[in-house]
């Protein structure tokens, strides 16, 4: 039972983290997207792609975070979250933001735990307990 409780708290914590990222960025969406474009001016990534990512990222963060918090479609949400981290790592590497990549690798490790221990996901809406 302890592993199921630990999984619950890790899943909810990651959910709150992502939901919070998305929520604060949604209320200032245009400023966030503009800031991201400015941060990627030195990147070889096309600016329209950076702008599109900057506009959509908060929605994905919010949705993935919400799903993780409530424990609904947990398998899909954890894979989506891990995929999002891969995209963030790729983007950070194009501007040589090694500090951000270090933090993102921690997220990658946490998503590894959530995905690999999915059988411990008992305290969730998508599990019959």
Image (cartoon, rainbow, N blue to C red):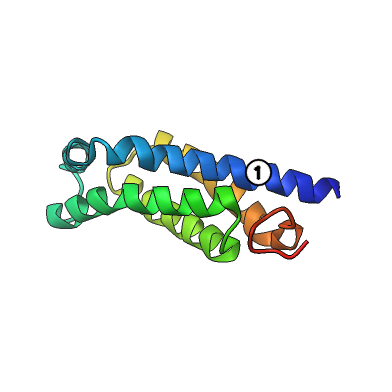
The reply, left or right, for residue 44 in relation to residue 9 is left
Query: At 64% from the left edge and 54% from the top edge, which residue is drawn?
Result: 114
> 79 or 13, which lies in front?
13
Q: Position of residue 3 (x, y in %)?
A: 81, 49
Residue 56 in the image: above or below residue 73: above
Tell which of 120 and 51 is nearer to you: 120
> Is residue 40 visible to the viewer in this orientation of the structure?
yes
Most foreground residue, 106 or 2 = 2
Q: Is residue 75 above or below residue 85?
A: below
Q: Is residue 111 left or right of residue 121?
A: left
Relative image position of residue 14 (x, y in whole percent): 56, 43
Considering every residue shown, the one lying at the far right of the view is 1
Instruction: Indicate left or right for 53 with 1 as reference.
Output: left
**Residue nearest the viewer, comparing 85 with 98:** 85
Q: Circle 1: is it few (<14), some (14-19), or many (20+) Cα within 10 Å?
A: some
Q: Quadrant of the C terminus?
A: bottom right
Give coordinates of residue 111: x percent, y percent.
58, 52
Q: Which residue is mark 1?
A: 10
| SS label for mark 1 | helix
Seen at 84% across and 45% down, the residue is 2
- Give residue 81's position: percent from left, percent from top: 48, 55
> Is residue 44 in view from this perspective?
no
Residue at image point 86% right, 50% down: 1
Rendered residue at 41%/48% (across/down): 62
Q: Is residue 116 above or below residue 105?
A: below
Q: Which of the 4 image quadrants contains residue 83?
A: bottom left
């Amino acid at each position: 039972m302890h592993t199921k409780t630990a999984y619950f708290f890790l899943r909810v914590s990651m959910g709150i983290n992502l939901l919070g990222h998305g929520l604060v960025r949604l209320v200032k969406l245009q400023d966030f997207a503009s800031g991201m474009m400015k941060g990627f001016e030195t990147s070889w990534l096309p600016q329209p792609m950076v702008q599109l990512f900057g506009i959509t990222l908060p929605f994905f963060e919010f949705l993935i975070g919400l799903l993780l918090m409530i424990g609904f479609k947990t398998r899909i949400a954890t894979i989506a979250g891990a995929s999002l981290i891969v995209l963030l790592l790729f983007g950070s590497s194009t501007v040589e933001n090694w500090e951000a990549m270090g933090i993102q690798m921690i997220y990658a490790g946490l998503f590894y735990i959530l995905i690999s221990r999915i059988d411990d996901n008992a305290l969730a809406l998508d599990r019959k307990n």
